[in-house]
Amino acid sequence: MSNLLEKQTSGNEWPTPEQGGILQPLQTPQQPPSLALRQQQRSIFDNLEAQMVRFAQEHQESLKVVKGFYIFPKDSPVLQFMNSHRGIPQLLADAVPHLRKHFPQTVFTLRSTLDDSGSPMLYAVALWPGEPHDAVVALDQFDDEWWLANAYPAGRFLTFTYDLI
Amino acid sequence: MQELITPVTTPISFFQVEMDYIEPDLRLWLDRSNTILALYEALKRWYIGVDDVEIITTGKTSEQGVSFKIPQKKCSFFFGAAGCKFTRDSTDWETAPETIEILHTALTALTENTGVAIANRKTVIGLHIQPKLLHFMNVLAPLIPQPLAGLEKPSPESTAILVNWGMRRITIDASALVANGIFLKTERQFDTFVSYEEIARQLKADEDQIFAILGVEEVPA
């Protein structure tokens, strides 16, 4: 969203730390089966590993979109939540154009809490500088136009709301 | 100067200093094995490995050379036939002494091994600051001259400012990397006789000046 052609980074790429053990379950030692079975297993694992690498890339791409719109601290439980609920980042990314439409020039933050039963919940919170009634109207329009049709199934862990500032 | 202070965090930052040699040395393009060894030895204490050394063979001749990366410190040092460049990412004022130490080590290894003399030091600080409560245009809007802002009915969605004084330049723009972010770039050129400490003092003062004009204050993440 920058306006000038100036480079906004140093140009260096630093590898992100491993998220931990996506492929580790495939690395435990096993008894050697017969050759045919080994070949079949190898092809299944090859395909599975390729799929998991692709899933990890898609997840990172969704996270990039989320980080470009929603504010949350770097090492917060929010990131942990999104890594353990893989459907949420894409949902948050898909919500962006609709939130921009109904909440123009509004800052959105992400907050992770536990509900009454101890289950984690994620809140996407609009920091609303205006009247509460207007925030409620905007939320209703957002719900009717997009959220209600797209909330299931990942959306049971996600709530869009507002805070007055 | 804005009266209301807006808290901001700085999720992304970088510091860079680019140094031209007084005279280019083509030997550094043709035969630089001893220089690579000297720099590798000097930077070893920060746990660099063979894979952290990269030979750059693309681009113009002045852009070709050798780059050393120090992953633990998110630093890199590049040298070529016409100049060298030091970069540190995710940097702040608390790590400034360490940054100076790494830069000085790399530069000393280079100059002592090759005999090149540095002509100037062009510093760049890039900050992506993120207002926590206000939309970023609330921070930038006061910088837009009213006759321009008033040309259309709705408020401007974004703006960018670039001011150049020759030895100093300031860029303010919307951030392309951070939600609700503002990108600040301050550049200043120093002569070689200015100490690192004086450079750090001046750059800190430059940053404080811009923060005061924007009416922002950095808070912990």
Image (tube, coloured by chain):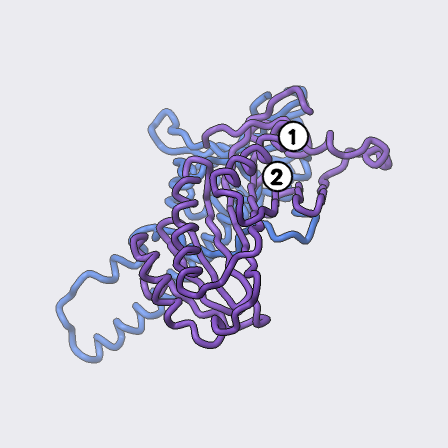
| Percent coordinates x, y for residue B152 in the rendering | 85, 36
Q: Which chain is purple?
A: B
- The reply to whether discs 1 and 2 touch (Cβ–Cβ < 8 Å) is yes
Label 1, secondary structure: give it: helix
Labels 1, 2: front one:
1
Q: Residue at x 14, y 72 (%)?
A: A32
Ranked by sequence position, the earlier of labels 1 and 2 is 2
Image-quadrant location for residue B150: top right
Q: Quadrant of the N terminus of chain B?
A: top right
Residue that badge 1 annotates: B214
* Residue A161 appears in the figure: no
Q: Say above or below: A52 vs B34.
A: above
* Residue A56 appears in the figure: yes
Q: Say above or below: B47 vs A37.
A: above
Residue that badge 2 annotates: B182
Q: Residue at x 61, y 53 (%)?
A: A7
- Whether callout 1 and callout 2 share a subunit is answered yes
Label 2, secondary structure: give it: strand
Pointer 1 chain: B
Horizontal arrangement in the rendering, residue B92 relative to residue A132 (left or right)? left
Q: Residue at x 68, y 39 (%)?
A: A101
> What type is the residue that disc 1 sits on?
Leu
Mark 2 is surrounded, within 10 Å at the Cα level, by few (under 14), some (14 to 19) or many (20 or more) other residues, namely many
**Chain A appears in which tint?**
blue
Label annotation for residue B87: none
